[in-house]
Amino acid sequence: MAADEPHSGWPSELTNVFERSVTVEYGSLTASGRPITVPVCPYLGASGKTLDVSTGLTYPAKADRARHNPKVCLLYSDPIGPGMSQLPTVLVQGHAAVRDADLQGNTDRYVRLAAAKYPATTKGVPRVVLGRLAYYYARIWVEVTPLRVRWWPDRNLDSEPKQWLAPAGTEPPQSDPPPHGAAPPPWRQPPLDWRPVVHDAINRLTLSDLTTVDPSGYPVCLPVALVGLQGDKLPLKIGSGAPQLAHGPACLSLHSHGEVFSGQENRALVGQLLEEAGVHTFVVERALGDWSTAGNKLRMMAGFVGKAPKLAPRLKAEAARRNQPVPKVRLRSSD
C-alpha cells in the first residue's frame, strides 16, 4: 500500500497510536507454545524502529518467554481516555529482543518515561516511598521489531484491515545474553477456582481481548465481545474483518483502567478456542495470578509496600544472575 513512511518503516499514521496508547496487550508464547497475554504500558523505542514494553526484574516471565521464543504480538486497542476512542485498533506481530545487560540504565529509563507518560500514578506519593520501590522500578525491556502490522478503524473489526509488512530481508536485533541459573518461580499463585474470577471480571472489566497462535507460529491478539459464561464456556463475538483464528490453546485477557490512568486491573484466563455451529467459544481451563494496580492512591501504595517481603529478595537474586548490582531508583528533581 502507498503510505508516507518515516525512518521507522511503518506508516506514519500509526505512530500517533504507538505514542498515545495508554496500554497495549503484549502476547508471548510459553515453552509449549501456549499464548499468554497481559496489558502493559507501551513506549516507542529510542531508535524509532521498535515498540517497547517492560517487565519487572523481579517477575521476568514475560521477558523469559520472549527470549525463548521471540515471536510476539502487540494489540493497541485501548479506547479509554480522552480522544482514545478515535484511534484505530492496531495488531503488530514482530520479533522481540530482551534487554537486561544494563539494569541501572533500564531502571533509569523506566523511571523517566513512566513519570512523563503516567504522572497520575505517582502524584502525591512521597519521594522517599518511591525511592524504596526498586523491586518494582527495576526493569527488563522488551524491544519489538514490527514485521507485520494490520489495523482497523475501531475495536469492532467490521471491515477488512489495512496491512503493512516489513521490507524483505529485515533482520531484527537479538536479545542480550541470558542470565545464568534457573528462572524464579511465579511469585503469585493463581486462584484455585477460576469461576469467581470470571464472574467478577466480566461484570466489571470493560475490555476483552483474545490471543491465539496463527499458522506461522506468531501469537495474534484481537478484541472480542463476551456473550456470557455458560458453564466453563464463554461464547465470543468477533468482527467479520478479523483474520481466521486457529482452534487450540488461547488466552483471554480482561482489563480496564480509569479515564486518567493511575493504575489498571486485569485478569488473564487460559483455555481453548473452539468453533461450534459458527460461534467461537473460549473454554476456560484456569485463571493466572495477576498483579493489578487498581484502587485509590493510598491503597495502591500500601499494596506496593506490602509486596516488599516477597519481591525484595528476588531483586537481589535476579541482579546477581546477571552479574550486576541491584539498580537504584534515581528520581530526577522534576519527578
Image: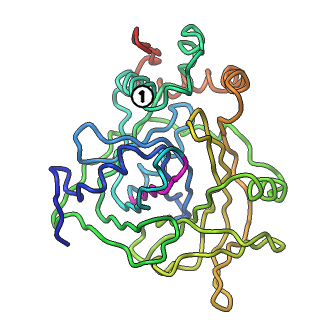
- The image shows residue 315 at horizontal and vertical percentages of 55, 24
Position in image of residue 119 (x %, y %): 49, 26
**The N terminus is located in which quarter?**
bottom left
Q: Residue at x 23, y 43 (%)?
A: 48
Mark 1 lies on residue: 110
Q: State the image coordinates of residue 38 (x, y, percent, origin top left).
A: 56, 50
Q: Quadrant of the C terminus?
A: top left
* Element assignment for label 1: helix
Figure quadrant of residue 254: bottom right
Please say whether residue 266 is one of the residues in the magenta stretch: no
Q: Nearer the viewer, residue 314 or 55?
A: 55
Residue 79 included in the magenta stretch of the image: yes
Q: Amino acid at mark 1?
A: Tyr
SS majority, magenta: strand
- The residue depicted at 45 percent of the width and 39 percent of the height is 54
Tell me if residue 270 comes above or below residue 60 in the rendering: below
Q: Nearer the viewer, residue 192 or 82?
A: 82
Question: Which residue sits furthest bottom?
Answer: 277
Q: Please give the name of the residue rendered at 47% of the width and 65% of the height, measured from the top-left corner.
A: 154
| 282 horizontally vs 42: left or right | right
User: Quarter of the image holding residue 107?
Assistant: top left
Q: Is residue 29 above or below residue 114?
A: below
Q: Position of residue 304 (x, y in %)?
A: 66, 24
- Range of residues picked out in magenta: 71-80
